[in-house]
Amino acid sequence: MKKSHLGRFRLLALAAAAGWPLLPAGALSDTNGIQLSVVTDHPGAVYAVGEDAKFLVTLGRDGQPITDAEVSYTLGQEGMPEPQQGKVRISRGAGAFGGTLKEPGFLQCKVFYRTAPGATNAVVAMAGAGFDPLKIKPSMPVPEDFDAFWARQKQRLATVPMRPELTPIKSPVEGVECFDAQIPCVPPRPVSGYFARPSGAKKKGHPAMLFVHGAGVRGSILVGPAGAAKQFGALAMDINAHGIPNGKPKEFYDALNAGELKDYRGQGREDRERCYFLGMFLRLVRAMEFLKAQPEWDGKVLIVRGGSQGGGQSIAAAGLDPQVSFISAGVPAICDHSGRVAGRVAGWPKLVPEIDGKPDPKVLEVARYFDCMNFATRAKAEGIFDVGFIDVTCPPSSVYAMYNNWPGKKEILIEPLMGHSTSPRFVEATNKAIAEHIAKMTGR
């Protein structure tokens, strides 16, 4: 298979697993011939605390600047209530306004243009600005018994024999063997995924790679591990987030999403022994155990990659298994659950509700054991991450609260005009970094 086809496989697999559009949601909005955009005066959109960030607005119709108009805007710290409201005069198609923060964090703005006074529909665009984001500190420390808690959970898992059932299935890629994999885990659900390996795989001759999913209810995706087995010579597996059967009709997953998995992200959040993410993370551990148990694994390279919820799972995997050598986490979720304690917005899944304007203390305590900000501190792996400055699902401050806790080699790609999405730039950067990592670790 040609390399370009493999690249397309990788891009589709990542986007499908996360449930995102492939292109970033940017600053430009084009509706009925009206073009509205807003960007910062620094192309990288990063400022020092106290520095004034200028937001530059352009407005046109059918490619021509609108000479005299008024645009409304809101501007405030990401996710916080009651942002500043204002209006900016557009002259010859352009206008500007400014803002700053006195502490590390992010400003997000929205601009609105209505073609007529009182019109119900508005053209909307967004932009964000970061202020010393590398100085964002954890909202709370790691719990003192964090390691002991997870050691007990892994002991529970160790009592479940790992007897995988591998059912051969048709491979979409020549020279690759593929299987549906069902691997026992802590009840009630197994690890459920697709496993791929190069045909004629050699003993101790191959890196391992695990693909993990973004939020939602769906089966595993074959194209990612099949493509990784072909391009990287990897023992590769894609697991769905819930331990549910693969290859079922859409109606099957819709029924689960409307039934027992409805609002799964909040299930059991009052008890750390029942929190939904406990089972999800133990399935990560078991999936990695399966990959490491393969006689063809080289014993050196263990990679985990995913986006959004899958990005969070990648971080958790590295925190739970010191043999993880590299991760890729796109716009990662499950970060900074306790953000409100520090006056910030928490990342998805917004696990901690509020009581009288304050975080629920019981859920807050549970959430700390499932926070990727804390798992990051235990990671031994190298990591590549990306962040969207107008992401309202996984806000950039939550990503940086985790990133700044990452102890090893790391890189973060900034997308100032991206919301909760992914970009070909990050996918290509991930694939390049993985190839370099494998070559460094194996000498090949």
Image (cartoon, helix red, strand yellow):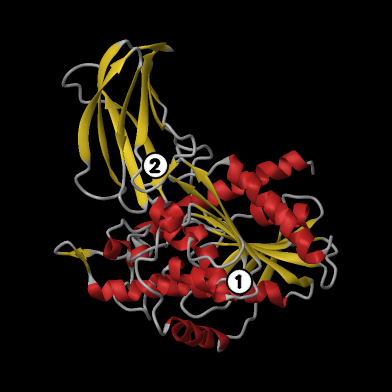
Residue at x 36% of width, y 78% of height? 272
Q: Is residue 179 visible?
A: no
Q: Position of residue 120 (x, y in %)?
A: 20, 25
Query: Mark 1: which secondary structure?
Result: loop
- Visible residue check, residue 331: yes
Given residues 234 and 259, the one toward you in this image is 234
- Give the labeled residue for mark 1: 380
> In which quadrant of the rendered view does residue 265 lie?
bottom left
Instruction: Give the mark count.
Output: 2
328 sits left or right of 119 in the view: right
Query: Which three-letter amino acid code belongs to the residue tagged 2?
Result: Ala
Q: What is the x, y in percent for residue 127? A: 38, 36
User: Dot 2: what SS?
Assistant: strand
Indicate left or right for 42 with 60 as reference: right
In primary-sequence order, the first of circles 2 and 1 is 2
**Cβ–Cβ under 8 Å for marks 2 and 1:** no
Q: Which mark is residue 392?
A: none
> Image height check: is 78 above or below 281?
above
Q: Nearer the viewer, residue 408 or 188?
A: 408
Three-letter residue code for mark 1? Lys
Instruction: Please state if 381 lies on the left or on the right of 114 as rendered.
Output: right
Q: Picture coordinates of residue 201 (x, y %)?
A: 83, 65
Picture quarter with the N terminus: top right
Measure the alpha-carbon separation of dots 2 and 1: 31 Å
**What percent of the width, then of the height, locates residue 444?**
84, 60
Given this view, does label 2 or label 1 mark the residue nearer the observer?
Answer: 2
Would you name the residue on which mark 2 appears? 129
